[in-house]
Amino acid sequence: MQKSIGIVGVTGFVGGYLARALAARGYRVVGFSRAGRGDCDAVQEWRRSGEWDFSGLYGVVNLAGERIDQRWTQANRKKFADSRIGLTGEIGAAIRAMPEPQRVKVWVNASAVGFYGDGGDLEMDENSARGEGYLADLCVGWEQALKDADVEGVRMVIVRVGVVLGRGGMAWDRLRRIFSLGLGGRLASGKQWMPWIHIADLVEAMVFCLESDGVSGVVNGVSPEPLRNEQLTQQLAEALNRPAIFAVPGWALRLLLGNFGEFLTGGQRVYPRALQSGGYKFRHATLQSALKELL
């Protein structure tokens, strides 16, 4: 029988890619949106967010979350928390309310590498301790909302996502536009580590988590080759045959983006040990491979 997977956040960048990947593999994709409908052609059925009808689903993937790359005002912080911690709690309550034989079998929930804070040069994996700062606090609360659901018989996976590079994604589209104009350069010192992942690998890793019964708990959604910001800058400039002579000082990042700009001056040297030990094979393990496909 064809399995059905529900995607919360299917109208977003990653959600659309995931829906198409699942449909191509023969899954029936159920999308959740506030309007109860959307324009992703890979979705076979639409349901309304907030009502959380998970009946008939084998699994659910929650990718929802207000964009974090904006000023962290009190109003925005409430949106960040409500769209992550609050919404994850709602999903957990809805799954827990289902009779056990009818519950989804697997729940994959997004988180972020912001969990680790600014780790400097320390090598980190899924067993590393949480970091300090607002984003770390937000990610801890986000993941705790899933853990608090404590749903019997449901395999739970938390995917801590890094910078996602893919066509149509904000990170890649901004980088390519800026560097194509010859205006690219490092951020602050450029020494901070940047955990990144190609969209194809993030999507395939999520499918891998849905299909692999032995995978549960935390999984880092990053490539096995984290790079310093200056390394990423240089490789991107070379791939586009453009100079990368500019540097954005830390004070300018803070002026333009507030607290988020300060976050960009730190980084995480994070590795995907859980995916690798589970047997996942990366399509684009190196930035050179990712850039070749993207360009």
Image (cartoon, helix red, strand yellow):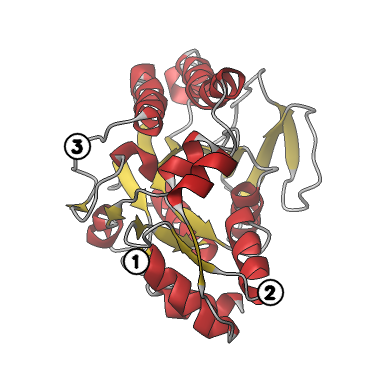
Query: In the image shown, does 108 or 224 lie closer to the viewer?
Result: 224
Residue 265 left/right relative to 86: left
Tag nearer the camera, 3 or 2: 2
Please state which amino acid type lies under the numbered disc 2: Leu
**Tag on residue 179?**
none
Q: From the image, which quarter does the C terminus lie in?
A: bottom right
Residue at the spot 68% in from the left edge and 68% down from the top edge: 177
Give the residue furthest to the bottom.
Answer: 241
* Closer-to-camera residue (4/144): 144
Three-letter code for the amino acid on which mark 1 is drawn: Leu
Mark-to-mark CA distance, 3 and 2: 40 Å
Query: Taking the image as drawn, is residue 69 in sight?
Result: no
Q: Estimate the x, y position of residue 282 in percent, counting from the top left.
A: 38, 69
User: Which of 104 and 74 lies nearest the eye of the viewer?
Assistant: 74
Residue depicted at x 58% and y 57%? 171
Residue at image point 52% right, 76% down: 244
User: Looking at this view, is 130 or 41 the one in front?
Assistant: 130
Residue 194, horizontal then vertical, whole percent: 38, 58
- The image position of residue 75, as x and y in percent, is 61, 18
| Observer able to see residue 259 | yes
Does label 1 or label 3 sit earlier along the sequence? 3
Q: Which residue is mark 1?
A: 227
Quick one: SS at disc 3? loop
Q: Are marks 1 and 2 in contact (CB under 8 Å)?
A: no
Q: Are marks 3 and 2 in contact (CB under 8 Å)?
A: no
Give neighbour class at mark 3: few <14, some 14-19, many 20+ (Cα, 10 Å): few
Q: Amino acid at mark 3?
A: Ala
Near mark 2 (Cα within 10 A), the count class, few <14, some 14-19 or many ≥20, is: few
Residue position for label 2: 181
Q: Give the labeled residue for mark 3.
A: 129
**Sequence order check, earlier mark of 1 and 2:** 2
